[in-house]
Amino acid sequence: MKHYLVTGGAGFIGSNLIRKLLATEDCRVTCIDDFDPFYSPAIKQMNIRDFKDHQGFRLISNDLGKTTAAELAGLIPEPVDVIIHLAAKAGVRPSIENPLAYQQANVIGLQNMLDFCKESHTKQFVFASSSSVYGINNHFPWKEDEQLMPISPYAMTKLAGEMLGHVYSRLFGIRFIALRFFTVFGPGQRPDLAIHKFTKAIAKGKPITMYGDGSTSRDYTYVDDIVKGIIAAAKFEGADFEIINIGNNYSISLKDLIQAIETVTGKKAIIEQYPDQPGDVPKTFANISKAKRLLGYQPETSLEEGLQSFYEWFNQHHTILAP
Ligand SMILES: NC(=O)c1ccc[n+]([C@@H]2O[C@H](COP(=O)([O-])OP(=O)(O)OC[C@H]3O[C@@H](n4cnc5c(N)ncnc54)[C@H](O)[C@@H]3O)[C@@H](O)[C@H]2O)c1
């Protein structure tokens, strides 16, 4: 039986991943999450509610930025097969306000996990990187070997993470797979992300904030597709270090996104336009041929279908998400 260690498992992507692992794999899962107040911890408790009492699940509520490898070894004495490190402070804009907190959680937190990986002789490490590492770059769709020009402290911590992983892979033989996720959406999506914010406001008849003229665009990727990519990376044995885009190969403008949410909710958006935000890149667009080749990755859910599933989840959990 495989033992997965998933950090950030009470968050959006992590909780979807653990639900899938427990349902489809012969495994047990140890989750580390400190229920960081970046968004309501009550939402994170809700995320893990349906598997919290599963006999194969264990929760450790520690801050990885402050928990050493030796302390982790005391908490997790049994062998681990794969570490999937999703814990991080996410979000571009807040990282500009508080870059030090992002260093602590995202870089020191990763360092502690890699040291634990080394000490515990865990072979495989999957790391949640981000499309934001590309920054300002017009060679669309982005391939993994593009020049990287991050423009936010958050993006920089993700790039640092990829490089830290390379160091540990070379020095200690850890298989380190960095997955560059492109804007993830679907049930459980973080409340700070556009689809969640817009759906909530439109459903309540409140105005939405649109930064820029609506022409910025994103490669939106449905969370079940991301989870499939993560599980494939957890089983990948083809090389000891890889960086792989996990996106949708489809970039949609903010204006078109708002229209699609209007269709799903059946309501018209009241748009308030503000200037572009510093740190936000104008466009993301993934080349996913490497993910297809190495991981057999193939995104399956369209934006429309994914928005519909998100809206159903949002309505089901209305009392916590939109009190
Ligand atoms: N959602 C996206 O669109 C997206 C895109 C690119 C990359 N990513 C990355 O994927 C990962 C998961 O993202 P998400 O959207 O699920 O975010 P999330 O905020 O929902 O989940 C992250 C989890 O990590 C936990 N955490 C934060 N700091 C911690 C610490 N110091 N110690 C222990 N736990 C800590 C949080 O409590 C949270 O539950 C993150 O690393 C994020 O940077 C996400």
Image (spheres, rainbow, N blue to C red):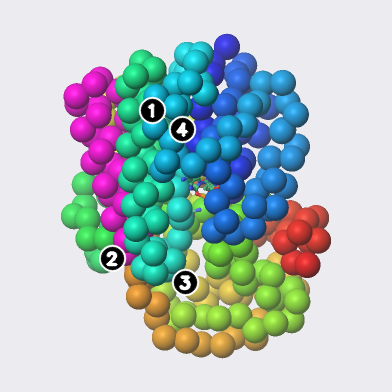
Report the disc number at residue 69.
1
- 100 sits left or right of 163 in the view: right
Mark whose residue sits in front, 1 or 4: 1
- Residue stretch in magenta: 152-179
Q: Which part of the image, by quadrant, shows the C terminus? A: bottom right
Work out whether residue 57 or residue 109 is closer to the camera in this orientation and state it: 109
According to the picture, the residue beneath numbered tag 3 turns out to be 253
Separation of residues labelled 1 and 4 (CA atoms): 16 Å
- 322 sits left or right of 180 in the view: right
According to the picture, the residue beneath numbered tag 4 turns out to be 84
Separation of residues labelled 2 and 1 (CA atoms): 31 Å
Residue 272 placed where, x, y %?
56, 88
Mark whose residue sits in front, 2 or 1: 1
Which residue type carries mark 4?
Ile
User: Which of the 4 image quadrants contains residue 234?
Assistant: top left
Q: Secondary structure at mark 2?
A: loop
